């Protein structure tokens, strides 16, 4: 068997990669608009809830703190304005395992590199609806080495509050008996 | 391998898709402009905007959250290369009422139509 030509070698390598199952993918996800979060940076304590909602619009997440009458925590209304962008490159290698009449494709190796940016403004209002604690953070996270460039406690609190809000919303939706799939185009008609 | 076979293989091993996912029904955002702070009541909110996505119990008062989310997804793949982009934007209205049920604050956002298809390298 003679030496393989370069073209044949490349073709065989490519076929081997295809057969083993690998992909090189470029991924980007965007959620939210940064305008409101950036405008929130100019807010100072003393602004009212009515002014903020009128100027910045509806928040991405709204949670009530200390709203339970039995709570000793001072009652607060917390708003989040969020913009999240994930941009990364993934190299994935997965195997092909025939099992009976079907095939399993487990991921055997994955390498990601890229980054994500979480830009968020957190606004706390007291029981009178007065802004008492505005906070803003632009948090870049590098995926290559999993480092966090700045203190991410603000982000962690945001994820906790958002999960709590979504849990309440899902529970209410299940109580209403709504279907999970809302892709029916008949819903395109406005409610009124 | 001939060029025609290679072209056919490339064509068969490539593809793309776009998709759109909507969460909650849309509504006319202009309806929120008919609410008046200090005058409209909880009953007006429910009559004009309908059932909310979420009600948040504040102390005092309540917040009625109306939300409609649109996600636009686009992907392309060719042999071992793939691109994927997902853009999610929302329309939302938040109405806050005081302990007497009178509207004290209204906020609206109209961003759902800003969600766009595209490539991972675009804005």
Image (cartoon, coloured by chain):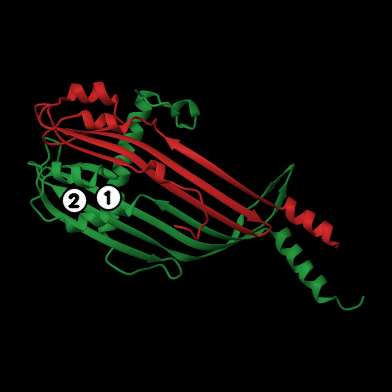
Check if mark 1's residue and mark 2's residue have beta carbons within 8 Å. yes
Q: Chain of mark 1?
A: A
Q: Check the rendered structure and report the hue given to chain A.
A: green
Quick one: which residue is furthest to the right in this view? A1
**Foreground pick, B71 / A190:** A190
In the rendered image, which residue does mark 1 sit on?
A81
Position of the N terminus of chain A by quadrant:
bottom right
Residue A158 seen in the current view: no
Image coords of residue B20 (percent x, y):
50, 40
Image coords of residue A85 (percent x, y):
40, 57
In the displayed structure, would residue A11 be above or below residue B97? below
Total marks shown come to 2
Residue drawn at x 32%, y 63% as measured from the top left: A139
Secondary element at image label 1: strand
Residue drawn at x 35%, y 25% as measured from the top left: A175
Mark closest to the chain's N terminus, 1 or 2: 1
Q: B83 left or right of A157?
A: right
In the rendered image, which residue does mark 2 sit on?
A123
**Foreground pick, A172 / A26:** A26
CA separation, marks 1 and 2? 9 Å
**In the figure, residue B77 lies in which quadrant?**
bottom right
Position of the C terminus of chain A by quadrant:
top left
**In the figure, residue A109 lies in which quadrant?**
bottom right
Q: Check the rendered structure and report the hue given to chain B.
A: red
**In the figure, residue B61 lies in which quadrant?**
top left
């Amino acid at each position: 068997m003679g030496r393989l030509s370069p073209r044949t070698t490349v073709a065989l390598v490519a076929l081997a990669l295809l057969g083993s199952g690998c992909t090189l993918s470029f991924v980007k996800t965007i959620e939210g608009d940064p305008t409101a979060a950036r405008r929130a940076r100019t807010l100072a304590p003393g602004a009212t809830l009515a002014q903020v909602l009128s100027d910045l619009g509806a928040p991405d997440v709204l949670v009530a703190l200390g709203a339970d009458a039995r709570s000793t925590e001072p009652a607060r209304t917390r708003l989040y304005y969020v913009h999240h962008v994930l941009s990364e490159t993934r190299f994935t290698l997965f195997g092909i395992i025939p099992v009976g009449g079907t095939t399993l494709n487990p991921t055997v190796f994955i390498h990601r590199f890229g980054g994500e940016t979480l830009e968020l403004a957190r606004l706390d209002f007291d029981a009178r609806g007065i802004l008492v604690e505005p906070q803003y953070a632009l948090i870049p996270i590098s995926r290559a080495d999993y480092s966090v460039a700045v203190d991410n406690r603000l982000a962690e609190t945001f994820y906790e509050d958002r999960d709590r809000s979504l849990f309440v919303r899902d529970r209410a939706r299940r109580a209403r008996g709504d279907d999970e799939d809302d892709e029916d185009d008949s819903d395109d008609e406005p409610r009124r | 391998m001939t060029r025609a076979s290679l072209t056919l293989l490339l064509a068969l091993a490539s593809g793309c898709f776009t998709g759109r996912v909507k969460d909650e029904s849309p509504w006319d955002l202009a309806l929120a402009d008919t609410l008046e702070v200090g005058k409209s009541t909880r009953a007006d909110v429910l009559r004009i905007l309908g059932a909310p996505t979420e009600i948040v119990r504040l102390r005092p008062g309540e917040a009625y959250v109306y939300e409609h989310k649109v996600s636009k997804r686009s992907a392309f793949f060719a042999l071992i290369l793939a691109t994927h982009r997902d853009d999610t934007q929302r329309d939302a209205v938040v109405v806050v009422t005081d302990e007497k049920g009178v509207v004290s604050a209204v906020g609206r956002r109209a961003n759902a139509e800003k969600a766009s298809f595209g490539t991972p390298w675009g804005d």
